[in-house]
Amino acid sequence: MINLAIFGFGTVGSGVYDVIRLNLEDIEKKLGDKVRVKYILDIRDFSSHPLKELFVKDIDVILNDGEVSTVVEAMGGSHPAVDFSLAALKKGKNVITSNKEVVANFGCELLKTAKENNVRYLFEASVGGGIPIIRPLITCLAGNGIQSITGILNGTTNFILNEMFKNGKSFEVALKEAQELGYAEKNPAADVEGLDPARKICILSDIAFGHKVSPDSVPTEGITNITLRDVKDAEKSGYTIKLLGNVEKCEKGIYIMVCPFFVKNDAMLANVSGVFNGVRVIGNAVGELLFYGAGAGKMPTASAIVADIMDVESKNKLFDAAWEDDADPDYVLDISKRETAMYLRFEKSPDASTVKKLGLTLIEGTDSSYISARLPEGEILSAIREHAVASSFRIL
Ligand code: HSE
């Protein structure tokens, strides 16, 4: 009998219970053993819940139960989630999570603790919800040098952008809908201001390039300043706007950022709409790949968690993630040196020398919106400093 415990019975925790119940027969067949959720840890009152017998409020009941081999941390937030996860690993229990805040900030320590205690810490659901992206990066793409990872990593903001600009809904109405559908974080500022995708691009970067990047070292911009005017200009010039997490490997470090980008309409990422996520990975052997699917929501997230449970319980380990917290201050490169083309909307037409210097092309049907040539970003920004620029976006 495989005995599991779930820490936290919110959207994700209850989804894990539901997926196990939905597919129990198949799961048990694949594992060749019976599976049960023995405990659910939650401090709230579930005394009238149909599963009331499973609920406990004291983590020690679970930690001291030698029958429990794997726990799912679905609590959210950093504390006590990280403390409970470390305690479970030290007690010889595998830990599975979707908690990107914990993985991005404490993943290195948690993975080391798991290794020291001969158990595993898996977190497929922490990036891309139900999309398999972490395991493919660690295993299927192990023979590649990864060159870049670019993703729509936040379902809430992709849903909002879609609803605002394709269905004409206001930002507030679209956000409320995303919250009702269970996509948004408890505090949606983490979604709309870009912190959630910043955590996720850090996790992907840590796995792909082997060094920890703190979310607070990622230049991050959300979607709150995007106007309908920007969207119209994007449409006129054959682009759409997507909030992207982007990391590129260079000789001496990485360029990493989260911000809204202009994306050509025919690019694969431009066609990832609604709550869906899409992650483009470029490897030096495989070339360009796109991982696509439901990036948020109860059942897709639980799908990834249940697969992780089955991975640890099947004992068919290939590799686990590992990265160093070596804190090289020069590892994250200054994005002002990164070459990019930009969309620039001037308050009034720029002078001829700026047009020439930046290789500006007027977007047809606009008075003063331009696409620049590809130049180091710092050069573009310093050339426009004297001009009134209402809006600027990097172009993918
Ligand atoms: N708030 C997140 C999103 C949930 O919208 O993508 C999944 O991580």
Image (cartoon, grey):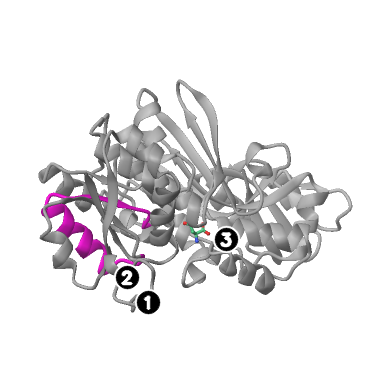
Q: CA distance from mark 2 to mark 1?
A: 6 Å
Would you say residue 287 is visible in this rendering?
yes
Q: Quadrant of the N terminus?
A: top left
Q: Label 2 CB, ligand 1: below 8 Å?
A: no
Question: Mark 3 sits on what residue?
Answer: 156
Q: Is residue 320 left or right of residue 13?
A: left
- For image coordinates 81% across by 58% down, the residue present is 368
Q: Is mark 3 within 8 Å of ligand 1?
A: yes
Residue hosting label 2:
52
Would you call the spot at circle 1 few (<14 residues within 10 Å), some (14-19), or many (20 or more)?
Answer: few
| Marks 3/1: CA–CA distance | 32 Å
- 343 or 64, which lies in front? 64
Is residue 71 shown in magenta? no
The quadrant holding residue 390 is bottom right
Residue 384 visible in image: no
Whether the magenta-drawn stretch holds residue 84 is answered as: yes
The magenta span reads 76-99
Give the x, y percent position of residue 152.
56, 49
In the foreground, 227 or 94: 94
Q: Nearer the viewer, residue 249 or 333?
A: 249
Q: Is residue 220 above or below residue 130?
A: below
Type of the residue with mark 3: Thr
Residue 266, image x and y in percent?
72, 37
28 sits left or right of 201 in the view: left
Residue pointed to by mark 1? 48
Which secondary structure, mark 3? Answer: helix
- Residue at 17% x, 61% y is 62
| Residue closest to the eye, 285 or 170 | 170
Pointers 2 and 3 in contact (C-beta within 8 Å) = no
Q: Which label is found at residue 139?
A: none
Q: Position of residue 389 (x, y in %)?
A: 70, 64
Task: Please state, as top left, top right, bottom left or bottom right, where the C terminus lies in the image.
Answer: top right
